[in-house]
Amino acid sequence: MKRLGVIFPLLLCTALAARAHVGSPDVYFEGDAGPYHLFVTVRVPQVIPGVAEIRVRSASGDVQSMQFVSMRLSGPGSNLPPTPDLAQQSKEDPQFFTGSLWLMESGALRVRIRVDGAKGKGEVSVPVPSFAQRTLTMDRPLKGILGLLMLFLAVGMVFIAGAAVREGNLAPGETPAPGKIRRAKIVMAITAMVVVGILYLGRAWWGAEAGNYERGVNFFKPPAAETTLENGNRLVIRAHGQDKEWPNEVKMEEIIPDHNHLMHLFLIRVPGMDRLLHLHPERIAGGAFAEDLPSISAGKYRVFADVVDKAGFPWTLVGEANLPQLDGMPLAGDDASWSGAPLTKPAGEASTFLLPDGGHMTWERASGPLKANTAMNFTFSVQTKEGKPAQDLEPYMGMAGHAEFVRSDMGAFAHVHPAGSVAMAALELAQAGVLEAPPAMRDGMVMGAQSPKVSFPYGFPQPGDYRIFVQIKCAGRVETGVFDAHVE
Amino acid sequence: MGQSIPLGTQLGVGMGERAAARTDATSIPWTIWCMVAGIASGTVGGIWDISWHMSIGRDTFWTPAHIAIQMTGVLVGIACGYLILSATFGGESAARETSVKIWGFRGPLGAFIAVWGCVAMLTSAPFDNWWHNAYGLDVKIVSPPHTLLSLGSFAIKVGALALMAGLMNRASEALRGRLMWLFACVGATAVAQAGLILTQPTWPVYMHSASCYLAVAIGIPAVLVGTAWGAGNKWACTRAAAIYTAILLAAEWILPLFPAEPKLGPVYQHVTHFIPLRFPLLFIVPAVVLDLLWNKVGDWKRWRLAGVTGAAFLASFVAVQWPFANFLMSPAARNRIFGMAYFGYFDPAGFLYDPYAFVAAEKTRGAFWLTMAFAVVAAMISSRLGLAWGDWMRRMRR
């Protein structure tokens, strides 16, 4: 560790099984459309172009109608929306509105929601990262049906050609001469060869289309975070996209700040998730990022690094790093760390976490099992060691809190704020042109006195065991509460 | 009307057979009307669907345009199913004597071809649905399932033409004269389908590029010459091209009468009504030229005739379409008659390109003339295919 100038290559990340942002593609948002407070869920399609489902709950019962429309988040055409769709209002629950929208292209999009009600009109735009998540394979029954139909068409074409030569120009009642029958067989053989050629070309075309699509899927897979340790404790991170075009399209030199920092780096020790570091490396030459690590326990760490590109699309770089024991610099600025007990399987059900100062953080969890793909409001309250609501909470990087939801197999990672799973930089871009949005809404930032409660709208993407790291700032210190959850 | 042009030795034999096999029926069978109605529905649906994508953008399986397209399969399936089942299991000997046999079934050859087209269209539906699920909704118009649908649709037209050709070749002069019009109508829809496939390379901005004429030379003569030559009528080519022109003009003038608004973005053009495709290509002129030409040299050997036909088609088409393109690009064409002021909602006119400036697809003069030379050869080969198809239909008896 003391040999200056020596570079220790760490275990580089290759394409991991996890998907972009990571394994948690749906968008959860809580915010205001003018005078109306909304909870928004956007279920993004598996393929692009595809249809997204929009679900909005209004906190108040005075909303009369809503309109949804999807648009580009930034760049050309971002201010040229089509005719919006009128959302369907639930008859049983008049505060609940639903709709569906086509997402026609991959990249940074937004869903604009316009609200009309007793308090007048309001509007908010929710950023939606649009990307194809998979390539569907054809299931066996459909493959069988289509195969039979194609066989029928191929063989049918051969026999039709034979019949045309054999009998097509015979006078009524006339029987085909042996010469015609022989010619028909020759034509059938030639037609069969042509049909095989057509099928071959068709298959090649299909393969080329599928290959193009697969490239698009790969493009949006989480880029690899290549990590190296230089000069003993300086961690350097370089991004490598999963497609060769990625570095041409997404330039690290052009990424935009997301709540005060260009990169939010999370190092989570695996397999037990018993160590967490939330750091903010600075950009260095060549589009790389670097930071001198604080003191750290040795082990294998999963790397998640959140950045937002200039179009407003959020990327999570994913990698692994085998780190040695380090006696580094004290934490500074917005950096934070936590260490504690590892995650058990199945995950524990504790809803209270003891903070270092003797206070508590409590997950105000509803009774009953947790379900995947269900939008929830995760509310946490902070109490002093005397059991009273904490009065000394303050904004942490401009927000009431930050939460990281991580599945035990590292297949799902989401960095969530009180405004939801959207990147704050994208949220700021999305509000361009939206009138009447209060400044706090524009930034997603906290202004003024802060409540001892903080909540995060989110939904677990898949069943499994999760660890939730909740980070708040209390009397100048960043505190991390840790909760485990088993999701069905 | 109804006068046959000289067709050489082979046709002379065919005409003798035609007289021997002549039927006494004087009215057009309902099955033909049913097929023609299905094809008309598909043509309207196809043009409507393209306009839908240019005006509204977003669709479902159940849009009126899609239903109109699917009605082709239904109506043609009913007609041909009846023809095949009645010839196979019915007691009518005339139907059996004018049929071909495939897999134990009997029926007119054209009915079998059309049924093949129906099955291709049917196959394309689940294939297309899976394609959407796997690779996304209609991001590309030319995809394997859409090509299968188009192939099926074209096979239905080929089948209908073959069915009518067989009937015409056995029919009385009165019935033959009436069938000739339906034959020309179906032929015109085939030309329209081929023209729609060539939409991109023949867009007005490319009309001063040789690639535009190469595309036309490959795709159009085979269809136009084939249907006209198969009809064996003095003005068959003109008739088919005139109907093609009428179909596209009707689409251009009628579609904008109906309101529409984009449902997908970005919306670069303010759209308040259905956007038609464009003014028809001037196939009418080469069609007249070919009819006049065939009246003089129709009995030439086929390759020689194909060479002259292809060259005449291309030369006359270039002679009118090239200067007409100048007019289309001028402000005088930006009206409801010529439709040059219509743009799809997604057209970033003035942003990414100038819609009224020609694009040179060939970068050098040499490349231009080389492409034009290819176009001449392609027109001749395409014409030869058309003549072969037409001769086949002229000999059709079943």
Image: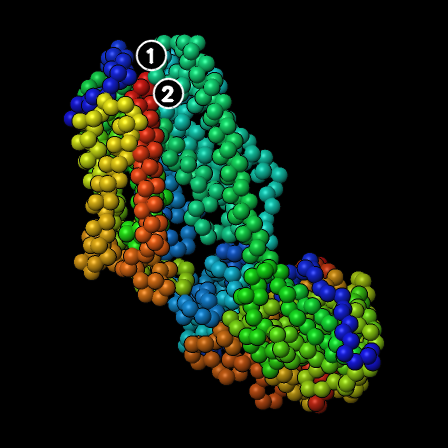
A473 in relation to B193, above or below: below
Q: Toward which corner of the image does residue B245 lie, by quadrant?
A: top left
Quadrant containing the N terminus of chain A is bottom right
* Disc 1: which residue: A172
Residue at x 56% of width, y 61% of height: A245
Camera-nearest residue between B111 and A116: B111
* Alpha carbon separation for disc pair 1 and 2: 11 Å
Residue at x 33% of width, y 50% of height: B366
Task: Pinpoint residue A198: horizontal percent, then vertical percent.
Answer: 49, 34
Residue at x 53% of width, y 83% of height: A440
Quadrant containing the C terminus of chain A is bottom right
Camera-nearest residue between A49 and A239: A239
Q: Toward which corner of the image does residue A7 lie, by quadrant?
A: bottom right
Task: Pinpoint residue B304: horizontal percent, then vertical percent.
Answer: 28, 27
Q: Toward which corner of the image does residue A119 lie, by quadrant?
A: bottom left
Task: Pinpoint residue B335: horizontal percent, then vertical percent.
Answer: 20, 57
Q: Which labelled disc corresponds to residue B17?
A: none
B356 in relation to A113, above or below: above
Judging from the image, what secondary structure is the residue with disc 2 in? loop
The three-letter code of the residue at mark 2 reads Pro
The three-letter code of the residue at mark 1 reads Pro
Circle 1 packing at 10 Å, graded few (<14), some (14-19), many (20+), is many
Q: Is residue A451 left or right of residue B290?
A: right
Scheme of image coloration: rainbow
Q: Residue furthest left?
A: B1
Camera-nearest residue between B313 and B22: B313
Q: Which labelled disc corresponds to residue B108?
A: 2
> To which chain does the residue with label 2 belong?
B
Q: Is residue A252 visible?
A: yes
> To which chain does the residue with label 1 belong?
A
Residue at x 28% of width, y 51% of height: B207
Q: Is residue B94 left or right of residue B240?
A: right
